[in-house]
Image: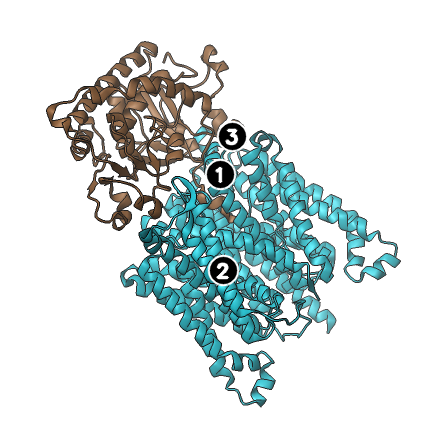
Amino acid sequence: MMNKNNFLSANRIYMMVVFLMLLAVVSSYAVVHQLWPLTFLELFTPSFDLSLSDMSIQLQILPTMLVALTAGGLLGLVSVLLQQLVKNTLASDTTLAVGSGANMALLIVTLFLPSLALGGSFWVAFIGALGSMAIVFLLAAPSRMNPLVLVLGGLVTNILLGAITALLLIYYAEETLNVMVWAAGSLTQNNWQVSTVLSTASVVAFISLMPLLKPLEIMSLDDRQAKSLGVPINLIRGLVVGLVALLTALVVSRVGPIGFIGLGAATLVNVFSVRRIGYRLLLSYVFGALLLWITSNATTLLQHYLSLNIPADAMTAILGAPLVIWLIVSQSRQHTDEVIPTLVSERRDTHLIGWGIALILLIVGVLIFTATSNGWQLSTLGHLIIDFRLPRTLSAAATGIMLATAGVLLQTLTRNPMASPEVLGISSGSAIGVVLAFVFLPSFGYTGIILSGLLGAFIVLSLILWLARRINPAYLLLVGVAIAALMGGLLSLVKISGDQRLQAVLSWLSGSTYLASPETAWILVGLAFILFLLSFMVIKPLEILSLGSGIARELGVSLRLYQTLILILVALLSTISTLAVGPLSFVGLMIPHLASTLGAVKLKRQIQLSAILGAGLMVIADWVGRYLIFPYEIPAGTIAAIIGGAYFLYLMRRIRA
Amino acid sequence: MKALTFSFGLCVALCSSLLLSGCQSSDATSQAPQAPQAMSPKDNQKAPKVMTPDWGIAATLTAMGYPPVAMGDKPFYREWVGKPLIPDTTLDVGTRYQPNPEMLSQLDLDLVIDNDFYAHLRPMYGDLPIHSIELTSPNNIAKWEDFIEPTLELGRSINKPQAAQDYLDNSKKQIIQAGQTFHARYPHIKKLAVVQFADTNNLRMFSYNSLFQPALETMGLQLVALADGNQWGFTPIMLGDLAQLDDDTCLVVVEPLSDLLKLELEDSLVWQRLGYSFDQAHASSKKGCCITLLPATWNNSGVASMNVLAERLTNVTFVGHTDL
């Protein structure tokens, strides 16, 4: 039986490898056919023997493909190494924020120490990669590297670093004009240097891994056993971490940030349940190489037809995210109830009235204390308040209420403390719907956009709920991350398309209350109140549902009806807030936890206090965003992500498994 | 993670402060005094207080001697347009595409001048009159004449038609003069191709519908482009496409061009084979193809940009074979 299984899985691996290779060969043929003017064999002529224009094309084909192969392979290798290290099938350069740490370090140095960025970009990226890994590991340490906490730590670190990057780009916009923003992300080569470096690194990596294979294999079973067998566990771990940081930094500094290839490759390896560590590493390299090769070819072809300069990162997200989602869905099996980590909090008096008064005072305060062209001052000009400040403040508050409410509903319904409209990709789904409506249904106007946004949110939500019963909650987060990445890729394609109409969508989805008007603000507030009251009314059934479906059925609660009702509520809350300020904020994930650490443990109290706190956070974020660099603005979503992300990382230290 | 890749598709770069300050000092003498001296009775009307989101209109108004009281993206104007210098009295209203409405409403304005690119902002101006003026050529091959009417219209809209006419006359004289200076310095250079780097592989080549065409024509030079331009006046090309340029065509690279990009270019096999070099040391040895770096010059600012372009071309040093 065992043998047969092995044989089957080996067969399936060969099939998959052959299929990917076929795809790579076919797409490569298409690329060569489209670009290369000479005969096929002449493609391999030494560069300097070709005419200048032929050489230029040769470089776009050969070294570019070689870079794609080696960079993808290395990222696959890195991801499997990480998974081996933390015994978690969700670890990868993307999910553990290794790449974004390297990326951020490079940005900071480019901004503030440009001369260092010219020569030492690799070492800067290396330190950044090590730093972000350290943050994530430190966060997960108290919970003994609980898989959910680890991935959540990576996720929050990713969002936080992304928001800080966005803030730096806005705040130091002038400086980023001065120093070319290191953004590369393009695989297209114009010499053989990078391909040589990455090929050499691949060979060196495999050779240096040889002596590590045996200890890693033993460690993958049990740490204590490994120790008793005389394996220097900490040394091996240190070496692997160093190697991971080194290889990731190499790829990020030479090619740019490339998401999802490593995770995709590692997940493929896991699907085929290969046991031997050596094979796992080899296969991950092969899968990663093939995936990025295919992506690179697709990018080249698309660039050729659209004559647009498409960043590789956008394409890997658009092609890689669905792959990851598909892999997770196809892997879905009986959900094993496991210990879900929770924040330690105790029930206390919540002083709802006090918080409510504080919120009102806050709103009054931000309405009259502002920056003007003459600096900071108290400004009580009635028309300024009514025409500009009040609508934006109210929109921010309404969004905060809706996201926080949606967060509480989702966290209770999925019994997953890390659920929220943003994290599970519901907001992203709604944003994708909006963008698609803009592109394909422009004639339907706002109705079309809103309906399409709702549909997007609803589809994601249904997928999440369907999956929630089948897969591990950590995988659920990964689906959300993938959907968010898909949206990011789509938005960056929209950005480079240069279409004016679509640029409007971008500013719409940027996370700012810029477009709030006196009319829309009151509608938004009204909607927020109605939806909040409706959510309040489903608390009882929700409490019963959260006990588990068996108990709910016994108590005679109409399971499907209420579940559908809550789903529609969450979809509405997410879509309306996405339409108002965009998909990027942190309110829905963080505020429910903040509320419960403040003592609001019971659902009823939690939802009330969350609404107040959510409104407060968004009002502050919006106010800071509007006046910090007046007359320029920073989107409220960015500020909320930084405040919220930093606070959440602080909270995470208290998570116990 | 994507934040980096998203907003800067364009490579943006080190515009050396040395070059800028050098230009600015000469700028102060050449640009400011033109219009106010020649005031006809018609021009005696007070100029309205103008706000414009557009750099081209702001540049032209300033060059005429009537800078707007408010404009968008003022700090970035320094980087991408540079000249004419906008006085400190002109207020910044935030980004051009999404100016700050609260700031805008606090300004004392008489008039908004914009173009269709900023049409989405019009509801924000309330009761203020709006003039819309396109400072670009509608033709496939731009001519000097295409820019006369919009510039005059701009003059009329601020009640200074004579200032606009004088500005046009003076500008044409200055550009012709700049052409003569250029020919005296580089008697053999006749053809120029103008590009801007997006990254090491991708460039924008300014084409015949850009204002480089009428500016160079007025200077007695010829613009060379490999294809017709898009609505912004350029055509995207790859680095290798530069090989199609004739030997007697000099390459003008418009800044910004970052140090990092320069470094990457030096490593590019294509760039090496093209035979260009920014290295000033080559200037004396006369080796390599003819090339120069032009301080950032905006392509969408009508006559004001042409003026700046002409003046900057006479000040830059070409490297490589200049006696073609």
- Give me the chain that's brown: B
Colour seen for chain A: cyan
Residues under labels 1 and 2: Cα distance?
Answer: 28 Å
Which residue corresponds to mark 3? B268
Residue at horizontal 48%, vertical 81%?
A562
Residue at horizontal 18%, vertical 21%?
B169
Type of the residue with mark 1? Tyr
Relative placement, left or right, of A13 versus A491 is right
Badge 3 vs badge 1, beta-carbon distance below 8 Å: no
Name the quadrant of the C terminus of chain A: bottom right
Q: Residue A179 in the image: x percent, y percent?
A: 50, 33
Residue at horizontal 49%, vertical 69%?
A405
Q: Residue B122 in the image: x percent, y percent?
A: 25, 48
Q: Is residue B119 above or below residue A410?
A: above
Of the residues tagged 1 and 2, which is closer to the observer? 2
Relative placement, left or right, of A631 versus B182 is right
The numbered disc on residue A616 is 2
Q: What is the secondary structure assignment of the residue under circle 3?
A: loop
Q: What is the secondary structure assignment of the residue under circle 1?
A: loop
Residue found at the very far left of the displayed protein:
B41
Q: Work out whether disc 3 and disc 1 sit on a shared chain.
A: no
Which residue corresponds to mark 1? A172
Q: Residue A426 in the image: x percent, y percent?
A: 48, 65
* Any part of residue A293 in sight: no
Within 10 Å of disc 3 (Cα), the crowding (few <14, some 14-19, many 20+) is many
Chain letter for mark 2, please: A
Of the residues tagged 3 and 1, which is closer to the observer? 1
Relative placement, left or right, of B73 versus A186 is left
